Image (tube, rainbow, N blue to C red):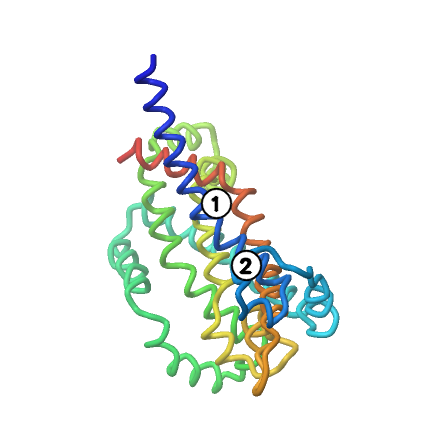
Amino acid sequence: MKGKFRKNGLKYFFLIVVALIQLFPLYWLITFSLKSNIEIFGENVIGLPQSWRFDNYLEAVTKAGIMRYFFNSVFYSVITVFVAGLITAMAAYAISRMIWKLKGFVFGFFSIGIMIPAQAALLPLFQVLDKLGLKGGYMGLLIPYIAGAIPMSVMILSGFFKGIPKEMEEAAYLDGCGIFRCFFEIMIPIIRPALATASIFSFLGTWNELMLANTFVDKDIYRTLPVGIMSFAGQYSTDWGLIGAGMVIATLPTILIYFMLSNQVQESLVAGAIKG
């Protein structure tokens, strides 16, 4: 009993240490956002604020206009997750469950999208969007975001589709179920854990993206949250507490999305381990 208690104690101690290490950046960010520049660059670097500056959040929301950037990021992220999820689910279903000649080529084409860095496609994409008259507006960011989210989602969903027994579809077809009804009413609920995993990747990739948003958007009304926070830095002086408040506001949706979909992600990982 003592050996078992000691073993469990060491295990819990190790897990607590890991949890504290993971939570420390969040703690530092929150305390950072409630300090003045004097405290941030003084001796009180990681301690609690001596004077709690909640005005940083008020200024970020009212004067800095961060809520406009926030709702822009929400718009880009929601549209990207929905459209990319629908397209990739249908593409992965066709690649994994149907028999046609070019499905291997199409899967390889999507796989190449993971290997090409966004920096390499930045200039050609800029020129194409500029000639089409899409640069500088919502579509100028939505198209690259959706295209960038598709390859990884196809990889995730294709592997999950391959592990589903084909007898389920055959039974549905024998009962008179069409291919579209089978896909939306039978297959989509089954792949919901994998779809949640792909959606989290798509959301985080869109929500945190800076390079494309900073390059393709030149009007304040279309700016995303990362670009808006970057604009808080002044030429001669910077209120770092204000930037910290903006970063906390930008972090909250990602934490919320993870807690909402964490069970689905865990189911996806467990199912993938069993199928593997």
Quick check: 58 above or below 238?
Answer: above
Spatial separation of the CA atoms under disc 1 and disc 2:
27 Å
Residue 219's mark?
A: none
Q: Residue at x 64, y 61 (%)?
A: 34
Name the quadrant containing residue 222: bottom right
Quadrant that contains the C terminus: top left
* Of pointers 1 and 2, the one earlier in the residue sequence: 2
Quick check: 76 above or below 172?
Answer: below
Q: Work out which residue is located at the far front of the displayed protein and give it.
A: 43
Q: Residue at x 49, y 36 (%)?
A: 263
- Name the element at disc 2: helix
* Residue 169 located left or right of residue 225: left
Name the quadrant containing residue 179: top left
| Mark 1, residue position | 196
Tell me where residue 107 appears, x and y as whole percent: 29, 56
Who is closer to the viewer here, 69 or 101?
A: 69
| Mark 2, residue position | 29
For the question of whether residue 236 can be seen, the reply is yes
